[in-house]
Image: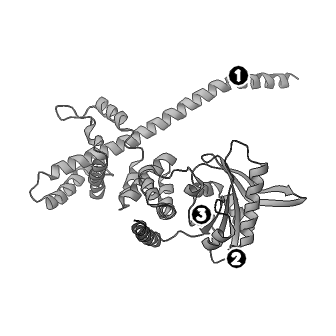
Amino acid sequence: MAEDKNRKIIQNKNDEILPLLSEVRNLIITARKTAAQNINTLQVLTNFEIGKLIVENEQLGDNRAEYGKQTLKDLSKSLAKEFGRGFSRRNLEYMRRFYIEYKKRAPAISQTASGKLDDGTYSPSKITQTVSAQLSHFDLSWSHYVFLMGIKARDERRFYEIESTENSWSLAELKRQSNSGLYERLALSRDKEGVRDLSYNGQRITKPEDMMKNPLVLEFLGLDEKEKYSENDLESAIIDKLEHFLLELGKGFLFEARQKRFTFDSDHYYVDLVFYNRLLRCYVLIDLKIGKLTHENLGQMQMYVNYFDRHVKLDDENLTIGIILCKTNNDALVQLTLPENTNVYASRYQLYLPSKEELRQKLIEWSDVSMEEIKEDL
């Protein structure tokens, strides 16, 4: 009895400090995140300012190209000797390029305080003010910016920078999204204005078409394209890698159920995967097909969507969206089978990373066709 009483007293004391513990933990976590963000921002700002100094120094030389090469070589040698790694000639060239690229895109950056005093020295307090003033300009790590500078097309680069910032992508996730051709896959499903909007605002989800990608890339599932696998194998692999699958689906998706059952006229039906998209405020049903898309598949999904609209969704929610994820898509069959204003879509998936060159070529061809269509309309 005495032991139980002591245990109860200890438990009560623990319960009493839970609110305090929660606040202290939140404070520590926030402080650490802020410190890490400031360190990353300070590194990026420092590299930006180094790049600026290098460019300004190059302008003093008569033969700027040769003068610049020799300057980077000499500067790297001296800095590496004093400060160690991080100041190779290649890294200094990245800093130089970083300044040139971001000065053009956002002149306001170079107009804010650099932390420099009138006598040419740098003040710690002034540098701290600079970090605060420029947080809105640089939200990513230096490693992110180095990777982004490797993307030649500025519209594409700007898109990935926006998405990395808004979705807090790690460097590994940024590389994966770029390697999977996310920009091209989204662009191919949009009109000219929509492609332009990708470059300036990133991916915006305001209607069902905004979330569609063709193909959906599922290389992270670990399924071999050449091996035989069933629809159940595909579904199980998706559940095992649900976090990756949600990232590939895009913004706003929440997972609700697997093999969601509903009954109609004493018959049981099962929806493979049920999600909710909080941006579109609607259910999204996904049916998995490893074979050829058929009109029966489309009719079945239309029935699933109708059931959810009539018996599951709330009055203030938007209409349910149905997606048939299949290995081979048939746009003509979809258009012929379904009514014009349907919320049912067929999207192709593949188990390997696509060739970015092939996607870019398709985008160029699509662009040429679109321009011809515009000219004909005129």
**Residue at the spot of label 3:** 220
- Between 141 and 331, the residue placed more toward the observer is 331
Q: Position of residue 66 (x, y in %)?
A: 15, 61
Task: Looking at this view, name the residue that lies furthest to the left.
Answer: 62
Percent of width and height locating residue 130: 32, 35
- 100 displayed left or right of 143: left
Task: Return the residue nearer the eye: 148 or 296.
Answer: 296
Residue in the image at 18% along x and 48% along y: 56
Residue type, mark 3 in image: Phe
Element type at mark 3: helix
Q: Earlier in the sequence, mark 2 or mark 1?
A: 1
Residue visible at 77% across and 50% down in the picture: 310
First reached walking from the N terminus: tag 1 or tag 3: 1
User: Residue 228: which numbered mark, if any?
Assistant: 2
Check disc 2 and give the amino acid type: Lys
Position of residue 229 measured from the top left corner of the image (x, y, whole percent): 71, 73
Q: How much space separates mark 2 and mark 1, taking CA atoms? A: 57 Å
Q: Which picture quadrant has residue 265?
A: bottom right
Q: Residue at x 46, y 73 (%)?
A: 358
- Tag 1 residue: 16
Q: In whole angstroms, how far apart are the C-alphas of marks 3 and 2?
A: 17 Å
